[in-house]
Structure formats: structure tokens, C-alpha cells
Amino acid sequence: MIVQAITNIFTGKTVLASYIIEQVCKVPEFDVGWVYCKFGNNDKSTFLAVLRGVISQLVKANGQLYPHVLAAKNSTGDLKLISHKVGKDLLAACLQVLAKTCIIIDGLDECDKDARGDIISLFTRLVKERNDAIPGSLRILFVSTDEADIRKLLSKAVCLTLRGTDYFSEMQDYARIWAKRIQDLHTLTDQETEEIVSEVLKRADGKHAALFGAT
């Protein structure tokens, strides 16, 4: 059933992340890269998947990066970006081109612990390197459930912990906007559309979301 398929995609945490991404994309001075991690999906939950997703979004946001990506692929022969080293070097090169960048990684808890460690290590290092060179040039936001290992690895980051009730109104409004878009796309009934909103809000009820900002 299409309603169930759609509600399986969205949780309260992801709706919150989507709202943040939408708002940050409205800030003209920032190029924005983001990725939605998903447990059990190797295309969305591995270290390489995060690199691919962020680089892809940054290239879409700023066409100046395309020649750099193309040159890296041609020089290494890594056409599908399967090398950790090439991915890390390419992301670093992209960030050097961009004046101000914001990267949002939703669902860090959806990755396994090894991948979490690699992701946090890379992005916190990039934040330090870029902001030491040009203060304020890179901001990272991790959206996650509040897991002990993630909190420990990001102990120096700014952390904001939220319950579903803390942002219920905003989440409800945003869920309704997207439910209406989905209704128009898939010609759903009003009842099916309302089921999407209700299911998203139910999944968020009582759950904690942690926002870790590395600056």
C-alpha cells in the first residue's frame, strides 16, 4: 500500500532534518550538502554512501564543482567513487572551492558503529581544517537519536536534545505540506493523506532527537 510505503520513509527525526535542510537552502551565502542515512541500506548507511551523497548534493548546489569531480574521476579511474581515499580527497577539494558550506547528515544512528566513527572523524577534521583556514566557512549538523557512542565522539560539539513534543507543531505543519505534495503526485484520497501525517507524528511521539553541531 502506497501510504504505508511513504510513512515507512518518514520519521519525526527525518521530518525535522528535512525542515532544517529546506530552511538552510534558502540562505544564499551557503552551499548545502546533505544525506539521509537508512539502516540496512548499503546505498544510504555506509561511510562511502555518505561521501557520495554529500558530494552529489554539493555539485548540484554549485556547478563550479563539476570540473573538479570530473577531473578526480578521470585521474583515478574511480568512476563510481568506491575508494575511501578518493572520496575523502574529493570532498576536501570541493570544500576548498566553496566559500561557505553547510552539511547536514540525518540519521547518523542508522549507520553501524564503525561507519559512525569514520563519518564523525572525517567531518569533524574537515570542520577544524576549514575553519582554521577561513573562520565560519564550514558548518556540520548531525541529526540522530541520542546514542552514547555518538555523544562521546561528538563531546566537543554543540548538542541540542529534543523530544517529539518540543517541535510537534512545526513537524505537523511540515508533514502536512509534504503529505499534500504526495497526495497530488499519487492522487491519494484525503483519508490516505491524513494517514501519512498521523503516522509520521505517531512515530515521533516521545522519541528523542539530538542535533550535534560541529563548528
Image (cartoon, rainbow, N blue to C red):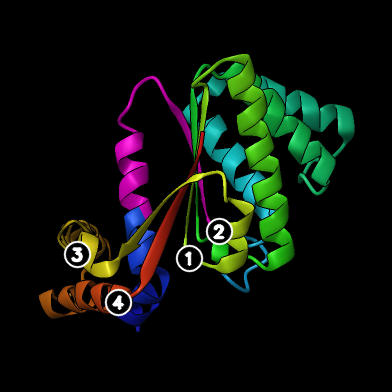
The residue pinned by badge 4 equals 206
Percent of width and height locating residue 11: 36, 69
Whichever of callouts 2 and 4 sits on the residue coming sooner in the sequence is: 2
| Residue position marked by numbered label 3 in the rendering | 168
- Secondary structure of the residue carrying tag 2 is helix
**Label 3 vs label 1, nearer the camera:** 1
The residue segment tinted magenta is 17-36
In the rendered view, would you say 19 is above or below 144?
Answer: above
Give the mark nearer the N terminus: 3 vs 1. Answer: 1
**Residue 153 is drawn in which quadrant?**
bottom right
Marks 3,1: beta carbons within 8 A: no
Residue 65 visible within the image: no
Residue 99 vs 158, above or below: the answer is: above
Give residue 4's quadrant in the image: bottom left
Q: Which residue is mark 1?
A: 146
Q: Secondary structure at mark 4?
A: loop
- Using the numbered discs, state the Cα–Cα distance from disc 3 to disc 2 in whole angstroms: 24 Å
Amino acid type at circle 4 is Gly
Q: CA distance from mark 3 to mark 1?
A: 18 Å
Q: Position of residue 127 (x, y in %)?
A: 60, 32
Q: Are marks 3 and 4 in contact (CB under 8 Å)?
A: no
